[in-house]
Amino acid sequence: MAETNALPADTALPGWLASLPPALQPYAMLARWDRPVGIWLLWLPCVIGLGFARLRSGTGLHLLDFVWALLFLAGAIAMRGAGCTWNDITDRDIDAGVERTARRPLPAGIVTLREAYIFLGAQLAAGFLVWLLLPGDAKIVALLALPLVGLYPFMKRFTWWPQAWLGATFNWGVLVGVATAGVIGVPSVLLYLGLALWTIGYDTIYALQDREDDALVGVKSTARLFGKHAVIYSFFFYLGAAALIAAAAALQGAGRVGAVTALAFLFHAALQVGRLRGAAAERNALAVFKSNVWAGALVAAGFAVAAMLPEPRPKSIFAEQEIVGGRPDKVHLPFGLEIRKDGSVPPGETWMLSDVRRALARSGHQVPLPAPAPPDATETSPEE
């Protein structure tokens, strides 16, 4: 490894990196430990899925859920670092042509390609240890995310929608969280799709920083695709995310707390868009992107509260029927009508017609009885 203390141009916390031993600093840069926003954005969907699954059980959060949350955090640190390392390995030539990333460890020669692969293997091993502790269903779901992680760095070369692939990848943890505490169903899938739209929105904002450099090196992104309308399109993705989060919460039984959670998420999105007006878009893009940690935290906290607070029973203007001494043999209806449990009718009466006649009689109206039907000539008496 080349001896140098050069820091990448896009490092966010050089002071924190400087406190590490010089031999470890380049690896911290590879794993983006200096920029923990990505760790939170990968961890929060896992926690959201955990709370979302508890909505259906109606038992609230369990003590074990906090253990799962810590385990998910360890997995997020390991797998996010592995993903960033893999991304730098595949993008080392592209990063060399972008001013913001040209001094990252690989394009700058601070770390060799072989050393980067060894570090990648170490992080995957740490993630594997976390994976071993997951329940069986969650293990299977987590494994299905590996193709998404492996192919993501190549998407920006072939499609204008790498942010959509990132949304599918970064939010897979919500399905892992649901599988850890419950069963994946339609509400869980809706929530996953909603969070994926959220990621498209915030990563489009993040990509605003690199539009010019991306155009020079041929990297595609939704920020370039949408051009001057990128910010408003991002808000549309936030709007769709809020709608799907609200729908998933309603189907899962989150009730009013779920609705308030979706509205709070949308309000936060509106604040983001307000900070990206006109020429301020590229200047504030990084800060607005980082604020999405709070957007995810709002959803996670909302589902946690909804899981702990039972939804109140709806009130009705009609009093419930009180049954004493077992089930009744008949049910009284308005206007003096009644339905008998066994469907029988007293001798000489006709169901409904006789009830109407009695109701009229109680109101003072006399209704003559119908003449009895003549006996059937074909019938024979019991004596014959």
Image (tube, helix red, strand yellow):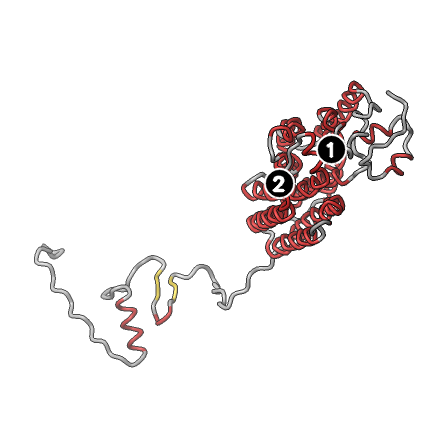
Q: State the residue position of label 2.
A: 196
Residue drawn at (34%, 61%) of the image: 340
Image quadrant holding the C terminus, namely bottom left
Q: Residue furthest top?
A: 114
Residue drawn at (89%, 38%) of the image: 15
Classed neighbour count for the residue bearing mark 1: other residues with Cα under 10 Å, few (<14), some (14–19), many (≥20): many
266 horizontally vs 323: left or right: right
Q: Secondary structure at mark 1?
A: helix
Q: Quadrant of residue 100?
A: top right
Count of picture labels: 2
- Tell me which amino acid carries mark 1: Arg
Q: Is residue 93 visible?
A: yes
Classed neighbour count for the residue bearing mark 2: other residues with Cα under 10 Å, few (<14), some (14–19), many (≥20): many
Per the rendering, the mark at residue 80 is: 1
Q: Where in the figure is residue 294, as x and y percent of width and height?
A: 73, 48
Between the C-alphas of marks 1 and 2, the distance is 17 Å
Q: Is residue 172 visible?
A: no
Residue drawn at (36%, 58%) of the image: 341
89 horizontally vs 334: left or right: right
Q: Where in the figure is residue 133, as x and y percent of width and height?
A: 71, 31
Q: Quadrant of residue 381?
A: bottom left
Vertical side of 130 occupied by 292: above or below: below
